[in-house]
Amino acid sequence: MDPIYQFVDDVIEAKRGTFTDIADDIWDHPETRFEEHWSAERLACALEAEGFSVERNAGNIKTAFVASFGSGLPVIALLGEYDALAGLSQCSGEDSPNPLVEDANGHGCGHNLLGSAAFAGAVAVKNWLEQSGAKGTVRFYGCPGEEGGSGKTFMVREGLFDDVDAAITWHPEAYAGMFSTSSLANIQVAYRFNGIAAHAANSPHLGRSALDAVTLMTTGSNFLNEHIIEKARVHYAITNAGGISPNVVQAQAEVLYLIRAPEMAQAQHIFERINKIAEGAALMTETTVNVRFDKACSNYLPNRNLEAVMYQALQALGLPEWNEEELAFAKKIRATLTENDLQNSLNNIANTSNEEGKAFARRHRETLLIDEIAPYAANDKILPGSTDVGDVSWKVPVAQCFSPCFTVGTPLHTWQLVSQGRTSIAHKGMLHAGKVMAATALQLFTQPQTLEACQSELHAQLAERPYQCPIPAGVTPSPLK
Ligand SMILES: Nc1ccc(C(=O)N[C@@H](CCC(=O)O)C(=O)O)cc1
């Protein structure tokens, strides 16, 4: 093995307990967006213990932080997330739905692994900087609120990436490969209707229903769905239905919209049309509407030069080996998944490349834990989902890989994923991701011409399509409530 790959492998294996303990501790403390106080502090303290200097409350976001080691250029960032999802509490290592705590949060997107692997990668890079005496800075970005919060977009707006040369990250998955597609830009916005309360039997004619307004607004936007571009998606959640009493005309109600499209300008255009629907609903019901911009994130801009470096590291480092016990557990999890779950997951893998991707997906229909790295090809596809890594990718070159932490076919945001996120399978995938990230970073420290090529690629794109942060000044990160 190339000495750099061997180096990161050795450092991360030597401290594997430190990294898996953090991942498990964060799994044990699932916190939703912008309330990840315990998780952020766990990582920040661990980074300090490894010799990093930590700036807490980064960009004035309480659960964001930046940890640095080294000095001078280049500045290479590893991005770590640690937020959980509401309502996904689940016991670890089980093969049936069984909440650990009723109605509590759970790590349904594997972000307990995401941040911990970036930490492992940062520690390996730090050790290399120390031993080699090379110039340069490694930073761990503690990025809160990815799920519905666009934490990184706020961090970009606050200038936290202004002096960064490149950023590297990953996402836990059921396979190993590259995030080679774009993603959907989105805007999240809350519409709050105000009406007049009244006795629903005695004086309904005196009441003006905010719930009626929400109902009419969602009806309107459901009709709109047929008249927007095909790749756009408009979803909503009724976050306040006005109360639980049918004999009261509901005076207040709120609906939260998530508007997605391949390009931010397209999402903004749909947003303007949704605003008209809100005004129409208010007009029909004689209520008033207050519009609160919640957050937004940009589509992801792949950097082909940096992806190639990361894919090389992925291939050089190979895949984790799975033991009998892990395969037996994966088999039990697989039994809980439907044929549609499996097909959707395989389609997602196929989507990250071209014909070879489809063949790969066909080859792995029966595979329980992945034993082959997915093919990589630059492509023009779009992941039907969003990520706030998008905004970082318009600021600095970014590459992100997937590492195998779950049974093939496991959908994100499910109890099956939570159940697997604290097992040796997840640990192996996480350590693997840490190594790939560190190895990618070290290529940038040792090959200035590669870093330059990544930056030229981004600058050429920005010359054609300049970046503007999609979150207006004055909008601040909002917790889930
Ligand atoms: N590699 C991945 C990156 C992001 C996601 C994801 O589920 N993101 C949320 C983000 C939601 C948001 O931006 O508000 C989504 O698309 O609903 C899934 C896989």
Image: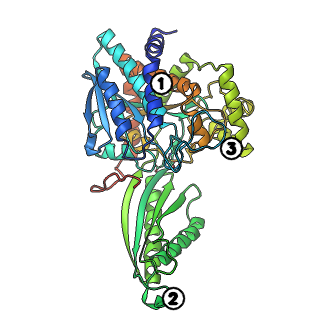
**Image coordinates for residue 402, horizontal then vertical, percent:** 54, 31
Contact (Cβ within 8 Å) of mark 1 with mark 3 = no
For disc 1, the marked residue is 20
First in sequence: mark 3 or mark 2?
2
Instruction: Name the secondary structure under disc 3.
Output: helix
**Image coordinates for residue 169, horizontal then vertical, percent:** 44, 32
Instruction: Name the secondary structure under disc 1.
Output: helix
Q: Which mark is residue 201?
A: 2
First in sequence: mark 1 or mark 3?
1
Query: Which residue type does callout 1 highlight?
Result: Thr
Task: Name the foreground residue: 273 vs 101.
Answer: 101
Q: Nearer the viewer, mark 3 or mark 2?
A: 2
Q: Number of callouts in the render?
A: 3
Q: Residue at x 59, y 36 (%)?
A: 419
Q: Is mark 2 within 8 Å of ligand 1?
A: no
Depicted 461 relative to depicted 18: above or below: below
Callout 3 crowding tier (Cα within 10 Å): few <14, some 14–19, many ≥20: some
Does residue 337 appear to the left or right of 469 in the view shown? Answer: right
Query: Which residue type does callout 3 highlight?
Result: Asp
Does residue 377 appear to the left or right of 280 in the view shown? Answer: right
**Image coordinates for residue 411, horizontal then vertical, percent:** 62, 42
Residue 406, image quadrant:
top right
First in sequence: mark 1 or mark 2?
1
The answer for how far apart the CA atoms under marks 3 and 2 are is 47 Å
Residue 31 visible to an observer of this rendering: yes
